[in-house]
Amino acid sequence: MTNAIGILTSGGDAPGMNAAVASACTRIVERGGRPYGVVGGFAGLAGRQIEPMTVEQAADHRQEPGTWLGSSRWPELREPAGRRACLDALEAAGIESLLVIGGDGSARGASALKAERSGLDLAVVPATIDRNIEASELTIGMDSAVAYALEAIERLRITGRSVPGRAFVIQTLGAPHGFLAEAVAAAAGIEDVIVPERPTDLDAIATRLGELATTGPAIAVMSEAAGDAVRVAEALRERVPLRVHPTILGHAQRAATPSPLDLALGETAGRAAVDALLRGESTFLALAADGTVTPSPLPAPLLSTTQGART
């Protein structure tokens, strides 16, 4: 049985990551193992920032946004020297398997480590607000990010109803794809959404916003991957006699309060990942809208360049 298991969060932080860490830590201890937290993602792993972790310590952060373990984007993992540094750090710490919680790049990094050391057991839990992993219907964090955007949109609707004659362009995170913006627009019932996956007709958007603004809220949603909301607002103002205001959600969207769904997904996925590792399996944990978790062997199909967002 695997005894020492490392837990690592990588890439952009996502609401619900801490729930996955907490449930995984609890499961490891329940099964007689020893949990270790990797501080600072793959960069921290290469730097041997590995610390024993307690159930109480992890549970204290369960409902917090972000990741208390810290994260990083570490391109050195693409190089043999970077992967060797990570593998050497795991060996020096006596860690026999690793749970990676993150997005597409994190899953690719985990698969690269597995390819270099077949005896290392790895589990990947998809956690990213962008939901850009084809193999999983949901990703931990997206529901929370959509809810954060919906709250902002509702406030724009209030001011739009209060003072008609204005329009708004709200910009989400999500580069280089528009999956998150698509999900936000669908949940908010907004027709006009600007994403890089399809052409944008600013003339048509301007006409619709002009019509909506005469009686109430007029809102378009766009992804940061499709440009800048300030410039889009300026372009729309040139086409219709409206005051068009940009609202950029920015990285505050990443720090949204974890929704009940993301907390539940984190709990379920963390336990399932540890169970797979204890069976000596390397796996990708696909998350479904009904709350089920389906393991598949690494490497799983990861980034989709054509698939739209699903809520």
Image (cartoon, helix red, strand yellow):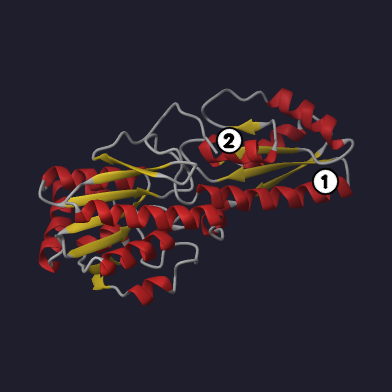
Q: Amino acid at mark 2?
A: Glu
Residue appearing at x 38%, y 71% in the figure: 58
Q: Quadrant of residue 246?
A: top right
Eyeballing the image, is 55 above or below 40? below
Residue 30: percent from left, percent from top: 28, 68
User: In the drawing, what numbered circle is on residue 182?
Assistant: 2
Question: Helix, strand, or loop for circle 2?
Answer: helix
Q: Is residue 221 visible?
A: yes
Q: CA distance from mark 2 to mark 1?
A: 22 Å
Left or right side of 152 for 139: left
Task: Name the quarter where the N terminus is drawn.
Answer: bottom left
Residue 61: percent from left, percent from top: 44, 70
Q: Nearer the viewer, residue 206 or 62?
A: 62
Residue 212: percent from left, percent from top: 83, 33
C-beta proximity under 8 Å, tags 2 and 1: no
Mark 1 lies on residue: 160
Nearer to us of marks 2 and 1 is 2
User: In the drawing, what numbered circle is on residue 197?
Assistant: none
> How busy is the neighbourhood of tag 2: few (under 14 within 10 Å), some, or many (20 plus)?
many
Residue appearing at x 39%, y 59% in the figure: 20
Eyeballing the image, is 47 above or below 222? below
Q: Nearer the viewer, residue 102 or 44?
A: 102
Residue appearing at x 20%, y 56% in the figure: 278
Question: Helix, strand, or loop for circle 1?
Answer: helix
Residue 209: percent from left, percent from top: 78, 32
> How busy is the neighbourhood of tag 1: few (under 14 within 10 Å), some, or many (20 plus)?
many
Eyeballing the image, is 134 above or below 173? above
* Label 2 or label 1, whichever comes before in sequence order: 1
Q: Outermost residue, front direction?
A: 31
Task: Name the quarter where the C terminus is drawn.
Answer: top right
Eyeballing the image, is 108 above or below 90? above
